[in-house]
Image (cartoon, helix red, strand yellow):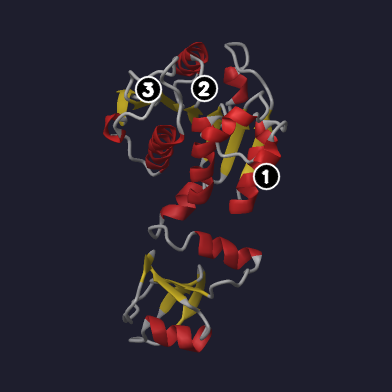
Amino acid sequence: MNIFLNENPLTVDEGITAYETKNQVKKDADVVILNGFLIKEDIILHANDRLTLIRKGAIPDREELEALLIARHTPGVFHKVKKARVGIAGLGGLGSNVAISLARTGVGKLLLVDFDVVEPSNLNRQQYFISDIGRYKTDALKDIIFQINPFIEIETKEMFLDESNIEDCFKDMEIIVEAFDSPECKANLVNTILSKCPDKYIVAASGMAGYFSSNTIKTKKMLRNLYLVGDEVSAAQPGCGLMAPRVSIAANHQANTVLRLILGERDI
């Protein structure tokens, strides 16, 4: 009978269990994951099951590390996600959070676009560190992502996006995440993609300021290829700033929408 052990094919006896396989192959493993689920009790294996064995605290080689990164995914998801190409326009509170979630998910290629550098006030909601202050956000975020998932292909562009360069910038991307603070930049990006790149999907956001209820942040399908995240009301203004919790909630709505689109789920 054939199964997959740490994503590699392995022939085992009919009726063998997960723990019996562990004891034969990797007796010192502390964690046993079967078909994306951490098991605490022994289970009989079936053909084409995916068994992942992990020894806590041990740094694996590159091939095994990639297998361990995908161990908790639903079987069949990872290989679709790894082929995806996603562009992120703006690497602030939304974009930096989206990028890291997609990196943890295993998206194959990320295009990171921003012209700005990290400054101290960014640290209240953006995925940077004090040591990143003064660096281009593209460079800082690329380094952070590689500490999480070194198997992703990352392209960076330090540029200001406008109607003249948006189409060319994202020509090789399937899905684009709008992650700007400026309403004008948001509108320019969305309108340009809708008018010039109708074959691409765009996931935009509007309304995630303050500390209002988390439950008002929703994802809506606005057009065939346009999705909008947020409450559409809570804009940043004096007395109502951008804060990590709601910004992160909105960013992960965007990341999950990207994942659903990659997997062929078009409805919300």
Q: Which residue is mark 1?
A: 143
Q: Which residue is mark 2?
A: 180
User: Which residue type carries mark 1?
Assistant: Asp
Quadrant (top left/top right/bottom left/bottom right) for the N terminus: bottom left
Above or below for 217 versus 32 = above
Residue at 39 percent across and 81 percent down: it is 18
- Please give left or right for residue 151 compared with residue 56 in the image: right
Q: Which residue is mark 3?
A: 207
- Occupied quadrant, residue 136: top right
* Mark 2 or 3, nearer chain start: 2
The percent position of residue 13, horizontal first and vertical second, equals 40, 87
Residue closest to the eye, 176 or 104:
104
- Regarding mark 1 in the picture, which secondary structure is present there? helix
The percent position of residue 124, horizontal first and vertical second, equals 53, 34
The percent position of residue 69, horizontal first and vertical second, equals 52, 60
User: Which residue type carries mark 2?
Assistant: Phe
